[in-house]
Image (tube, grey):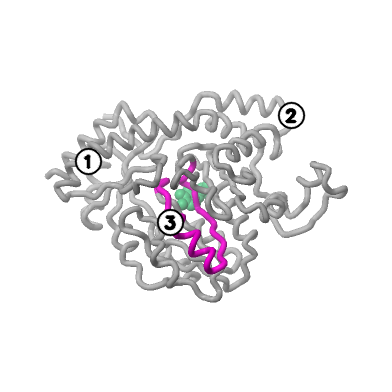
């Protein structure tokens, strides 16, 4: 019996052709033809003012933290149920992650709990669109406006997903995407920063180019190319952009294929949910998700541990997700918790993710049969 892996990177078949073309162009550093195509695609698909490829979503979040001009002790509100980079990008600037609980339905930052966490030091809110399902961005943008805060969307999982017909990542002041091989559209490692607030666009370019005004120089806007701000090297080389461009050209088909797999799981597990055995993902009506991942909520930690072990024994690799950051060593030392986080603590113990990748179709029935047989007992 063949092993069904949790993830398998999907290749369109055009990646190596593009990589060879990039090599042929004779420019392998960043911001060549393929990078420009990728940036333009992101701008056209999201309506953002400016999109800049980065070498990861982590890098895009770090750029956002520099753009936010955070001072040591400034606070950033975010969920604890997220990937490390959401908090680490701000901790690098000496800022304090303030962890707020998530909603029990979408597992996204609970907008009703944000205002109680705001203090005079709060500078930004970082919503994370878990599983490519949008946070309640209207509520979050309203809170940010009332309190003069920046909104930085961690849309790592949100490429081509929408909230009320607006693309995730293009709603806040800044948005960060990931093209890591575990995401929907991939380049191995890769990411992008969406600069939705035009006031931040020029500085974003400078931060990405080691703190220099190189981009303005090449556009003829300044006559000297020099060091003008802090920054780092956040741009990917052309090989990465060439690879990514092949994926972007097929992004709609990739998303449609993933949605079909997601939907098949969702229908297959409806009766388990009706029997009270599992809880399936909840997608609010105003969210168009992108099938980034499929999860089930089991009864408790023991139930999940047993389930993952039994699935592995059956040759199907399933995994849990985040260890909540407020309970991690660095999160405890560098972050603050607003209230207790009962939903985060509970759901993080019970969530299991099932394999979801293009090509799984042929074996998906085996996954469904195995899950059903295990949980119907
Ligand atoms: C994947 C992910 C990241 C990190 O993305 P990289 O491109 O690997 O840096 C950050 N936040 C969330 C929510 C993610 O899922």
The question of residue 135 being in magenta is answered with yes
- Identify the disc placed on residue 26: 2
Circle 1 — which element? Answer: loop
| Of pointers 2 and 1, the one earlier in the residue sequence | 2
Assess disc 3: are there few (<14), some (14-19) or many (≥20) residues with their C-alpha within 10 Å of its C-alpha: many
Label 2 vs label 1: CA separation?
52 Å
Name the front one of labels 1 and 3. 1
Q: Is residue 44 left or right of residue 270?
A: right
Please give the residue where the numbered disc 1 appears in the rendered image: 269
Position of 41 relative to 299 (above/below): above
Which contiguous range is marked in magenta?
Answer: 131-159
- Residue located 64% across and 42% down the image: 236
Q: Is residue 48 left or right of residue 203?
A: left
Q: Tell me residue 141's x, y (percent).
A: 50, 59
Circle 2 — which element? Answer: loop
Q: Tell me residue 339's x, y (percent).
A: 38, 73
Please give the residue where the numbered disc 3 appears in the rendered image: 82
Label 3 vs label 2: CA separation?
40 Å
Q: Is ligand 1 closer than 8 angstroms to the Cβ of mark 3?
A: yes
- Residue located 51% across and 56% down the image: 85
- Identify the disc placed on residue 311: none
| Quarter holding residue 342 | bottom left
Assess disc 1: are there few (<14), some (14-19) or many (≥20) residues with their C-alpha within 10 Å of its C-alpha: many
Q: Tell me residue 374's x, y (percent).
A: 17, 43
| Quarter holding residue 358 | top left
């Amino acid at each position: 019996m063949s092993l069904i892996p949790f993830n398998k990177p999907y290749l369109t078949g055009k990646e190596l052709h593009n990589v060879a073309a990039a090599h042929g162009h004779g420019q392998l550093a960043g911001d060549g033809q393929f990078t420009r195509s990728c940036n333009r695609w992101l701008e056209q698909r999201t309506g953002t003012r400016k999109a800049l490829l980065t070498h990861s979503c982590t890098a895009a979040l770090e750029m956002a933290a520099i753009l936010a001009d955070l001072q040591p002790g400034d606070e950033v509100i975010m969920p604890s149920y997220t990937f490390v980079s959401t908090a680490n990008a701000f901790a690098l600037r000496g800022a304090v992650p303030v962890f707020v609980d998530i909603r029990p339905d979408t597992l996204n930052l609970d907008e009703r709990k944000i205002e109680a966490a705001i203090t005079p030091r709060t500078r930004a809110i970082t919503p994370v669109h878990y599983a490519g399902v949008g946070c309640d961005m209207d509520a979050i943008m309203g809170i940010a406006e009332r309190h003069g805060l920046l909104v930085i969307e961690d849309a790592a999982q949100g490429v081509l997903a929408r909230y009320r017909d607006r693309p995730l990542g293009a709603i806040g002041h800044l948005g960060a995407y990931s093209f890591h091989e575990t995401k929907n559209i991939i380049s191995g490692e890769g990411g992008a920063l969406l600069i939705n607030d035009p006031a931040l666009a020029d500085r974003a370019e400078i931060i990405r180019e080691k703190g220099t005004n190189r981009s303005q120089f090449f556009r003829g806007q300044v006559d000297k190319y020099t060091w003008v701000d802090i920054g780092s090297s956040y741009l990917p080389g052309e090989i990465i952009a060439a690879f990514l461009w092949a994926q972007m050209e097929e992004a709609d088909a990739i998303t449609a294929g993933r949605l079909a797999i997601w939907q098949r799981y969702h229908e297959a597990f409806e009766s388990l949910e009706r029997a009270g055995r599992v809880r399936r993902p909840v997608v609010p009506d105003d969210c168009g998700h992108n099938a980034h991942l499929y999860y089930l909520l089991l009864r408790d930690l023991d139930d999940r541990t047993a389930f993952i072990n039994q699935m592995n024994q059956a040759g199907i690799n399933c995994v849990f997700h985040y260890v909540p950051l407020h309970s991690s060593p660095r999160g405890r030392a560098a972050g603050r918790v607003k209230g207790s986080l009962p939903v985060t603590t509970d759901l993080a113990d019970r969530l299991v993710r099932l394999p979801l990748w293009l090509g799984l179709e042929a074996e998906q029935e085996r996954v469904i049969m195995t899950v059903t047989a295990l949980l119907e007992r």
